Image: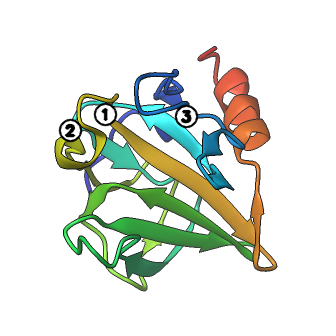
Amino acid sequence: MIISASFYALPLRRCDDQGCGHYGASRGARLHNGLDLACNPGTAICSPVNGTVTKIGHPYASDLSILYVQVTAQGYDYRVFYVEPVVEVGDHVTIHDVIGASQSLESMTRGGTQHVHFEIKGGGQYIDPTPVYQTIRSTRGML
């Protein structure tokens, strides 16, 4: 696997014409279940945790070209959306291993900020990833 900069070095996506990237931001009739991290298409994306790749999925049935990678650790599922995977289900990854390259969202965002989406699920519920992101980012001197 390729070694790259930390996942937590990516900046938070700010508000733009397509909305805001923070957890709980309005998405019309629903709330945003994750945290968006700004990056250019083709950016090497590292695993958010040490764990096992348990799923390569399609978040949108209407567009199977858009993918996500799920890494499971200690009973939690950490998902990174809009990634072209370089890993496979069953791979063991560390926080420094590249799991894929960020995909272009131009067809979806129509001028919005390019980004990856990060979410955490535990016990079937979405968990705000912001405290995890902020804690790891600050302990590594990246704030």
Amino acid on which the number 2 mark rests in the picture: Pro
Residue 68 vs residue 9, the one in the foreground: 68
Residue in front for this viewpoint, 124 or 52: 124
Task: Report helix, strand or loop for mark 1.
Answer: loop
Where does the image place residue 94, in percent across and percent down from the top left?
51, 58
Within 10 angstroms of label 2, few (less than 14), some, or many (20 or more) residues?
some
Which residue is denoted by mark 3 in the rendering? 21
Q: Earlier in the sequence, mark 1 or mark 3?
A: 3
> In the image, what residue occupies the spot 23% across and 75% down?
64
Give residue 1's position: percent from left, percent from top: 27, 59
Residue wearing tag 2: 41
User: Relative to residue 18, is residue 48 depicted above or below?
Assistant: below
Question: Could you tell me which secondary element the residue under label 3 belongs to?
Answer: loop
| Residue 13 place in picture, x, y as percent | 49, 27
Please tell me whether mark 2 or mark 1 is closer to you in this view.
1
Q: Observer-nearest residue: 98 or 117?
A: 117
- The CA span between labels 2 and 1 is 7 Å
Badge number at residue 95: none
Pointers 2 and 1 in contact (CB under 8 A)? yes
Q: Earlier in the sequence, mark 2 or mark 1?
A: 2
Instruction: Of the two numbered discs 2 and 3 on the same chain, state the one appearing first in sequence.
Output: 3
Q: Is the residue marked by circle 1 packed among few (<14), some (14-19), or many (20+) residues within 10 Å?
A: many
Q: Residue at x 33, y 79 (%)?
A: 61
Return the residue at label 1. 114
- Tell me the mark number nearer the camera, choosing from 2 and 3: 3
Q: CA distance from mark 2 to mark 3?
A: 17 Å
What colour scheme was applied to this rendering of the protein? rainbow
Determine whether, in the image, residue 133 is placed left or right of residue 44.
right
